[in-house]
Structures are given as structure tokens and as C-alpha cells.
Image: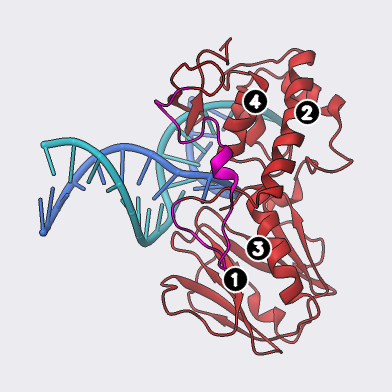
Chain colours: A red, B cyan, C blue
DNA sequence: ACGTGAACCTGCCGGC
DNA sequence: TGCCGGCAGGTTCACG
């Protein structure tokens, strides 16, 4: 569940359970370079839980705990660890007796304790573009970025252009803006439309707690509702809600890509 | 320097 | 039923 709306949902759910707590013990269940210097978190208290793009950032004072869920990472805060979590990687035990865990079958997720603000070992975070729902996401910068001769899909997946978009929301944003994902060098008017769509789409998805696949539930037993609003993602063969043309699935920049041939022209 | 493709893992689903 | 290939919401590394 790891694009901006899903990570923001995790942040909002976990923050009240984590902020003000002290990490008493760090239990790393698997030796993996994806987990770095975690023992340094022991004895630290969590002052704030923030999000940057798809990263979670726990403020530990002079240190900072960076978290990324990868493709399959799930986090929760529980009184007792459920035995059905078959891929527990890391558990942070808290001073109130609760446990903050990362369960991650594919091990693409990352956790690292760093000096606050020192993202040298995390290039994506170090070069993260503007937050799409924030003030620093400027339409002028975005228009310039989208004028480059790369597929729109590649540019939107690039975290330096705008933070937090992934495969689902890129396809959905292209559909809503009527832009073919393989199109290159967008004119300014089209890029402006896409800019507006991205902000609206992500705000709506956050309000719906993101998109959940299959039967996933997070640590609180909740799940996202945005999947009911998906218009192209995972809808290959189904009629477009706008024009009725069947949605097509292709591969673009190495990712499964969904679009409506009727509404999205000009590849 | 920049861009694309493969690699990194495990689980699940559909087809034979 | 069982095996195999293909695919999955991301990032990073190796190449051209």
C-alpha cells in the first residue's frame, strides 16, 4: 500500500500511538542491508511522525528514523503481535507495552536511523521533489518539467518531479487529465490541467484512506476505500466510465499501464 | 549526465 | 491437483 495517500493514511493512524512514546528495545528479526543502524533508536522518544513523499520520518531528536514500505510493507502498532504476520522483519517495543512492527514479505521496504536530515544514503529522499499537496508544488516548475521529451508516465513516477506518485495514481491522473501516458513534451495548457488533477486526485484519495488491494487491512483493521473510485487501474477490458471504450493495459517504462484509448489521445 | 532495463524478494493467480 | 510462468502498489544499480 505504498503511494502518497496510503503512506499518509498509515502516518495518521500511527502518529497518535507513537508520538510521545519511547522506544525501549529494537528487535530486528532479519539481517538485511535494508535495515540500517536500527539499534540506535533504543532509548529514544518519538517526538513527531512526518511523511515526505512515500517515506515516513519519525523525529527522535538528533536522530531520525526513516521508513519506506516498498511494495509489500505493512506497519502497525499493537498490544500483542498477531501470529499471522508471517514476515515480521522489525519490531520497536514501546514504553507503554505496545509494539510497532514492520511486516514485509518482499523485503523491498527500508528502515534506517540517521542523523536528522542526513539523507546521503537515501538518494530518492535526498532529492525528493515538492509535496503535491503543499505550497512548494509550483505550477510553473511542473509545466517546465513536463515539457521534457520523456513519457509523461516516466516523469510522474520520477520522485524528483513531484513526490509521492506511484503506478496507480499516475495512471489515474493521466486518465483524469485526458493525457496518454506515453505522450512526451506536454504543452503548457495540458501540463497545467495535469497539475490540477494531481492535487485533486491525491486529496480525494487521502480522504478515502487510499487504495487497498485484495483483503489487506492495516494494524487498526481499517482499509482504504479509494479502489472503488479507480477509473483505469486494474480495469483492463472494462468499459471506460466516460466514453465506454474498453480500458487497455500495456507496458510502459517497465510498468503495467492502463489507459482509455477513447479519452487519452496523442501518444 | 541522462535515460532505460534489470535486479532485488516473495506470494498469488491463471493456464496447462 | 500440481507445477510454471508471469505479475505485483518501488527503488537502485549497471549499463548504453
Q: Where does the image place residue A60, in percent across and percent down from the top left? A: 80, 74
Say above or below: A80 vs A7.
below
Q: CA distance from mark 2 to mark 3?
A: 29 Å
Say above or below: A202 vs A197.
below
Question: Which residue carries the number 1 mark?
Answer: A76
Q: Earlier in the sequence, mark 1 or mark 2?
A: 1
> Is disc 3 in contact with disc 1, using a CB cutoff of under 8 Å?
no
Secondary structure found at label 2: helix
Secondary structure found at label 3: strand
Q: Rate crowding at label 4 as few (under 14), some (14 to 19) or many (20 or more) other CA atoms within 10 Å.
A: some
Q: Rate crowding at label 3 as few (under 14), some (14 to 19) or many (20 or more) other CA atoms within 10 Å.
A: many
> Is disc 1 in contact with disc 2, using a CB cutoff of under 8 Å?
no
Question: Which residue carries the number 2 mark?
Answer: A196
Left or right of residue A100, residue A116 in this image: right
* Residue at mark 1: chain: A
Question: Which residue carries the number 4 mark?
Answer: A176
Q: Quadrant of residue A7?
A: bottom right
> Is disc 1 in contact with disc 4, using a CB cutoff of under 8 Å?
no
Amino acid at each position: 500500500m505504498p503511494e502518497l495517500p496510503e503512506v499518509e493514511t498509515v502516518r495518521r493512524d500511527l502518529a497518535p500511538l507513537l508520538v510521545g512514546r519511547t522506544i525501549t528495545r529494537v528487535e530486528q528479526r532479519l539481517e538485511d542491508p535494508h535495515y540500517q543502524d536500527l539499534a540506535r533508536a533504543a532509548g529514544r522518544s518519538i517526538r513527531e511522525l512526518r511523511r515526505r513523499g512515500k517515506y515516513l520520518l519519525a523525529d527522535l531528536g538528533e536522530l531520525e528514523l526513516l521508513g519506506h514500505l516498498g511494495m509489500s510493507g505493512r506497519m502497525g502498532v499493537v498490544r500483542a503481535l498477531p501470529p499471522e504476520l508471517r514476515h515480521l522483519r522489525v519490531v520497536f517495543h514501546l514504553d507503554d507495552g505496545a509494539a510497532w512492527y514492520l511486516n514485509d514479505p518482499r523485503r523491498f521496504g527500508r528502515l534506517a536511523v540517521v542523523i536528522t536530515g542526513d539523507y546521503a544514503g537515501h538518494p530518492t529522499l535526498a532529492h525528493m521533489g515538492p509535496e503535491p499537496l503543499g505550497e512548494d508544488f509550483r505550477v510553473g516548475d511542473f509545466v517546465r518539467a513536463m515539457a521534457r521529451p520523456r513519457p509523461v508516465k516516466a516523469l510522474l513516477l520520477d520522485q524528483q518531479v513531484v513526490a509521492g506518485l506511484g503506478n496507480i495514481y499516475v495512471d489515474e491522473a493521466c486518465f483524469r487529465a485526458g493525457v496518454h501516458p506515453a505522450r512526451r513534451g506536454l504543452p503548457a495548457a495540458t501540463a497545467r490541467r495535469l497539475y490540477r488533477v494531481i492535487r485533486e486526485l491525491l486529496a480525494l484519495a487521502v480522504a478515502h484512506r487510499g487504495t487497498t488491494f485484495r483483503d489487506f487491512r492495516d494494524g487498526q483493521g481499517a482499509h482504504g476505500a479509494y479502489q472503488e473510485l479507480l477509473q483505469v487501474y486494474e480495469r483492463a477490458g472494462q468499459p471506460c466510465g466516460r466514453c465506454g471504450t474498453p480500458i487497455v493495459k500495456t507496458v510502459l517504462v517497465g510498468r503495467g499501464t492502463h489507459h482509455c484509448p477513447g479519452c487519452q489521445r496523442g501518444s
